[in-house]
Image (tube, rainbow, N blue to C red):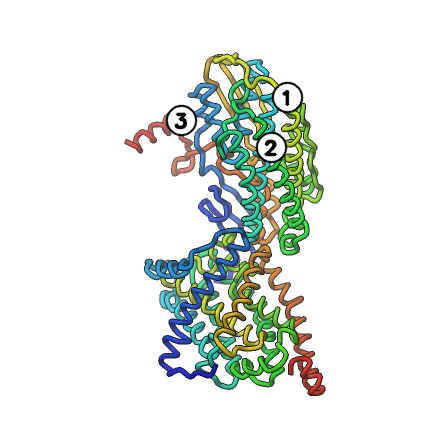
Amino acid sequence: MAEREKSEKFVVPIGPQHPALKEPGHFEFTVDGEVVTNATARLGFVHRGMEKGAESRTWTQDLYLMERVCGICSHVHAMAFVLGVEKLANVQAPPRAQAIRELVAELERIHSHMLWLGVAAHEGGFDTLFMFSWRDRETVMDLLETISGNRVNYSANVLGGVKVDINDRQKDELLRGMDFLEERTQHYLKVVTEDDTFLGRTRNIGVMSFDEATLLGAIGPTGRASGVLRDVRVDSPYAGYPDFPVNIVTATAGDLEARFVVRIKELFESYRLVREIVEKIPPGDLTTKIPRRIPEGETVSRVEAPRGELFYFIKSNGTDKPERVKVRTPSLCNWASVLTTAIGHKLADMPMILAGIDPCFSCNDRMVVLKEPDGQSVWDWEKLRQYGIEYYK
Amino acid sequence: MNVTFPPLLALLLFPGGIFLLTSGLIFEYIDRKLIARYQNRIGPRWFQPLADMVKLLAKEEVIPTGTIKALFIALPIVALAAALTAGLSVPLFGFKPVFSYPGDLIVTLYLLSLMTLCIGLAGANTEDRFSIVGATRALTQLFSYEAPFLLALLGPAIALGTWNINEINQGAGQNLWFILSQPIGFLAALIGLMGKLELPPFDAPEAETEIVAGALTEYSGRGFALFKIGRDVELVIGLTLIASFYLGGFSSPLDFLWKTMVLLFITAALQSLFARLRIDQTVGLWWRIGAILVLVQMLMIIVGSSLSPFVGRLFGG
């Protein structure tokens, strides 16, 4: 009996349905007492077939589809797609449109980072910070609503420009909102760097050195917290970023505290950018003409989402529908860092380490492989289609 | 207030029994509402704890496979019974305790610990992994706060030279309040009570982001309701004990009300101020800081009260 217990591994499953993570992902942590000795992840619970769906829709319809890849960073998806298509069509959106794209992207980053701050605090059992940061996040949600009419899928982009403009009243509201948020964010920076119980949960937890981060390909704020100088907004500026450049924010510690600090400091950078754009937005048109059929060719479009580099590969065959759209979201690149840093930590640290990369599940589920019960043969598209028809008959 | 109730009435209606259960629900409501307000939320309506209780009691209780059935059913009942029994020797609502005898302080404290033991057993009884991890943590936490909590409540008892709760209650009002002469003991008792009730930041045994509901994951319906109300009752009794020992005792129900409410305000603030402690941090906090401070204070009380009556008075003797 004792020997059996010894050889049996004690596995704590987290997910797919779990109160801590609002999206479905399954993790298995092998624990020895409280210490985690192995970690595995299984994704793919929210595969929605969007890439395939994009092939049967027109370019304009795809814009709406792509905006719905992710609920938190909807604008960057649409922006990555639009920039790619514009590059294929050899069309340049007017400067005012590019500035508004950047403005909405930065507002979205603010809302995403504040949402993350709350979620990460909740994972650590600090519900007061969760409630406060989400209350303050409402400010930026309201600002997005004043600009676009929507809180989540702003739908600011069209092929060849943007469909929303900002007037003087909105500029005033933006400036006032930024002042309020800046003051609050100062307070949060103080909390995450000075509160003793919170530091007990973040300092020297989930440490990822620069070498590890490079090896595992960590990107976005997760990588920047380990000193990886990689930010698409700086490396290859797009949309309005050449005119309104952003300063890269990094830290060297690589622990959870550094990830908090990097994201909060990026908030200050976003406030500065929003103010600058509001003050110096170039006048001019919002859209330019773009052909209905996009010329044949293929392109890569990269933007910096709140979670890291978002990568689009778009291939056109000269018709009004794309031949292939491939999306690689930032969360996918950061999973390896979670599974590696988890080992050796306490089970109680797992939710915070998981949340530390700001994971987004629904946007990184790309592929489902269906196997026969024998585990050998793999289903092909035709068989899957037949199965679906039979199932819903 | 020296009112004697007929035993059956005292046991079932007032101040034990139904009235104690009801006040447990009211205290839970005030606690939840206060935390909600501290966190800038609106919080529950006044009947929410009662509604939760009615709903849970009416629900089907699922007994998972792999458990000892009798134990699974008996544990919540034992836990609630222990909490209600503990209420009989404390000066609830400022009235004289129903059953008072020498040494009832120790019995009451052990009855209060029975709840945690039952939760630990309940977790170990099931095969669920979250329950087992939760049970381990609950029992680990018990060993960390129990000794300092006990010592903290013994401080006034030693200073007054009696182990009877009622006598301590009366004696506490006649001297300098113990919160002033034994501040460390007061803090240790209050924070120990939070650990006992698994309130944040000591809620590692039921951390919902890691192990769902901890030891009570498999409990639903009636069993869960009994554990929940048992904890509410413990909250009332724990606050009564600390208020009567450290805040100068009770002489009237009004006294009881304002003193326990002050304590509830403090615990609610503490609950919303901190991030959850890991179980190793909890143990470290209690044994590295809590236990040593309480022991030092204990030594001061003993030395002080034996040196001279004058110095003894200074330390609350």
Badge 3 vs badge 2, beta-carbon distance below 8 Å:
no
Q: Earlier in the sequence, mark 1 or mark 3?
A: 1
Q: Name the residue type under label 2.
A: Asp
* Residue at (65, 74) in percent of width and height: B180
Quickly name the residue at label 3.
Answer: A381
Q: Position of residue B105 (x, y in %)?
A: 52, 80
Question: Same subunit under labels 3 and 2?
Answer: yes
* Residue at (43, 63) in percent of width and height: B228
Q: Which mark is residue A172?
A: 2
Q: Name the residue type under label 3.
A: Trp
Chain letter for mark 2: A
Q: Earlier in the sequence, mark 3 or mark 2?
A: 2
Q: Which mark is residue A198?
A: none
Q: Name the residue type under label 1.
A: Pro
Q: Position of residue B189 (x, y in %)?
A: 58, 70
Find residue A80 and report its image quarter.
top right
Q: Quarter holding the C terminus of chain B?
A: bottom right
Whether residue B73 is visible to the viewer of this picture, yes or no, is yes
